[in-house]
Amino acid sequence: MSSFDELKKEVTSFRDERNWKQFHNPKDLAICISIEAAELLEIFQWSGKDLEVEGKRDKIEEELADVFMYCMLLADNRGMDIEEIVRKKLEVNRKKYPIEKSYGKSTKYNEL
């Protein structure tokens, strides 16, 4: 078992030990992902600089972990393999953003 598989099992065990699976429908899990992502973004609100992260590492880690855990739970709920869907999306992005057109650019794929 990979360390990622062990982590997924630990996250779902945490949920199951508390009998929370009953509350974890796709809609509410998607809402949770959005809320936690907003909390991650909130760390940078009014920072004065978009890139300022000094002294914020612990809070960033905490919110990022929440986002990842809810993503794992949504994937589990829908029977999706995270590694598989990420690899599929990477392949889509490779086609949208070929290196020769996108290297060093932040331009959206339809404007390359």
Image (cartoon, grey):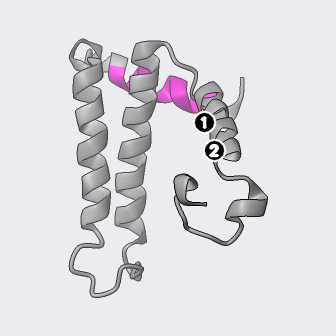
What is the C-alpha distance between the residues marked 2 and 1? 6 Å
The answer to whether marks 2 and 1 mark residues whose Cβ atoms lie closer than 8 Å is yes
Read off the magenta span: 5-15
For image coordinates 41% across by 52% down, the residue present is 64
Relative to 23, is 51 on the left or the right?
A: right
Q: Amino acid at mark 1?
A: Lys
Residue in the foreground of this view, choosing between 64 and 100: 100
Q: Secondary structure at mark 2?
A: helix
Q: Which residue is mark 2?
A: 93
Query: Is 7 contained in the magenta span?
Result: yes
Residue 27 drawn at (x, y percent): 24, 23
Compared to residue 93, the image places residue 4 above or below, namely above
For image coordinates 78% across by 61% down, the residue present is 100
Q: Which mark is residue 10?
A: none
Q: Amino acid at mark 2?
A: Asn
Q: Secondary structure at mark 1?
A: helix
- 10 Å neighbourhood of mark 1: few (<14), some, or many (≥20)? few
